[in-house]
Image (tube, grey):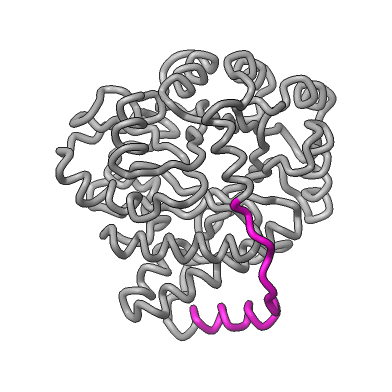
């Protein structure tokens, strides 16, 4: 049976030590990064090899394929996609056009992923873009108001699901006010709860029926002194309570600088707080062993949510990809928003 974590790998193929680890630890899923990606055939092979190692042909394989700055699959083998802010600007000019472009862009991303056997995209973001915040979200966000962000995020999720790819809503309950990059340090938000419920939390509340979500490594002092990922109060009272999210909840990467303690302690704290699965991304084998030691088999309510999340994956809808790519390019071109580095930048 699968254990309650998602792992990374170190390179473009599965090393001998990793292979043994996967067989013995049986992580629920795999997440891919640029270090794991060379060309389409190689990616397909590593995905298939992972599933063979864990003995589960439906084991989820995840990636962060947002577009803009966060795009693990990039030219020349894959198309470049615009940042979330581009859809937001389109939406401001014409709501319907913004929604249509966001959905079609996500549908095309899904086609890229499905061809490789990747079944989950860590997208959409429902984080708001707010003044004074750290640039880690920045142009990845769709906008500054919850209604707008939720509408575009719902379109993106819909496009992914039409392409047979499951979305992961992030970073619940909101990273938009963070004045630090949680990859490096712990962001602390001192906004009062009433304001948070009307803004940051509201965007996620409108998306509560999505199958999976990823936590924010952020402290909201009005509610608890602990980061969301390791806060039982934030998960039960805000994520499961006010927001009403009942899908599979995964932590953000437990190797990020925002969290304290050893990797094993971070893993145990995340699960004790109410995360269903822990995400560990850096591909360091010694840390992967520590994560595995501090997780159990994915059973009970968490196991049921995991089964339900995978069951939400839809059969791919028919699409003329060549025509859709031409249509998508025309949407961006007509908007006069596709020029410059911001919409198509990759990292």
The correct choice, above or below, for 347 with respect to 261 in the image is below
Q: Residue at 42% of width from left, 81% of height from top?
A: 336
Q: Residue at 51% of width from left, 32% of height from top?
A: 253
Task: Using residue 127 as the reference point, say whether residue 188 is left or right of it.
Answer: left
Q: Quadrant of the N terminus?
A: top right
The correct choice, above or below, for 159 with respect to 31 in the image is below
Quarter-of-image position of residue 319: bottom right
**Which region of the structure is painted magenta?**
312-332
Q: Position of residue 90 (x, y in %)?
A: 38, 75
Q: How many marks?
A: 0
Front residue of 264 and 86: 264
Quarter-of-image position of residue 30: top right
Front residue of 316 and 171: 316
Q: Position of residue 316 (x, y in %)?
A: 68, 65
Q: Position of residue 57 (x, y in %)?
A: 79, 42
Q: Position of residue 91 (x, y in %)?
A: 36, 74
The correct choice, above or below, for 330 with respect to 242 in the image is below
Q: Residue at 58% of width from left, 60% of height from top?
A: 161
Q: Residue at 51% of width from left, 69% of height from top?
A: 103
């Amino acid at each position: 049976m699968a254990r309650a974590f998602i792992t990374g790998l170190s390179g473009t193929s599965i090393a001998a030590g990793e292979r043994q680890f996967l067989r013995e630890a049986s992580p629920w899923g795999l997440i891919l990064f640029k270090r794991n990606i060379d060309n389409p055939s190689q990616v397909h092979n590593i995905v298939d090899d992972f599933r063979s190692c864990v003995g589960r042909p439906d084991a989820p394989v995840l990636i962060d394929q947002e577009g803009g700055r966060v795009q693990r699959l990039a030219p020349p083998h894959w198309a470049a996609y615009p940042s979330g802010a581009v859809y937001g600007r389109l939406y401001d000019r014409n709501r319907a056009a913004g929604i249509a472009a966001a959905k079609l862009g996500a549908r095309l991303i899904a086609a890229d992923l499905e061809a490789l056997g990747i079944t989950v995209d860590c997208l959409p973001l429902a984080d708001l873009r707010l003044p004074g915040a750290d640039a880690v979200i920045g142009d990845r966000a769709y906008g500054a108001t919850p209604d707008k962000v939720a509408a575009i995020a719902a379109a993106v999720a819909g496009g992914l699901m039409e392409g047979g790819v499951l979305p992961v809503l992030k970073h619940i309950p909101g990273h938009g006010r963070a004045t630090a990059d949680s990859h490096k340090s712990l962001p602390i938000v001192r906004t009062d709860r009433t304001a948070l419920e009307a803004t940051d939390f509201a965007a996620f509340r409108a998306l509560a029926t999505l199958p999976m979500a990823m936590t924010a490594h952020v402290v909201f002092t009005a509610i608890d002194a602990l980061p969301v990922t390791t806060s039982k109060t934030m998960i039960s009272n805000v994520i499961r309570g006010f927001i009403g999210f009942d899908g599979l909840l995964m932590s953000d990467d437990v190797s990020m600088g925002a969290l304290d303690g050893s990797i094993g302690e971070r893993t145990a704290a995340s699960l004790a707080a109410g995360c269903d699965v822990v995400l560990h991304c850096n591909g360091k084998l010694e840390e992967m062993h520590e994560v595995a030691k501090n997780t159990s088999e994915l059973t009970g309510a968490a196991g049921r949510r995991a089964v339900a999340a995978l069951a939400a994956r839809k059969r791919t809808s028919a699409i003329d990809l060549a025509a859709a790519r031409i249509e998508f390019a025309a949407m961006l071109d007509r908007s006069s928003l596709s020029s410059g580095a911001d919409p198509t930048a990759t990292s």
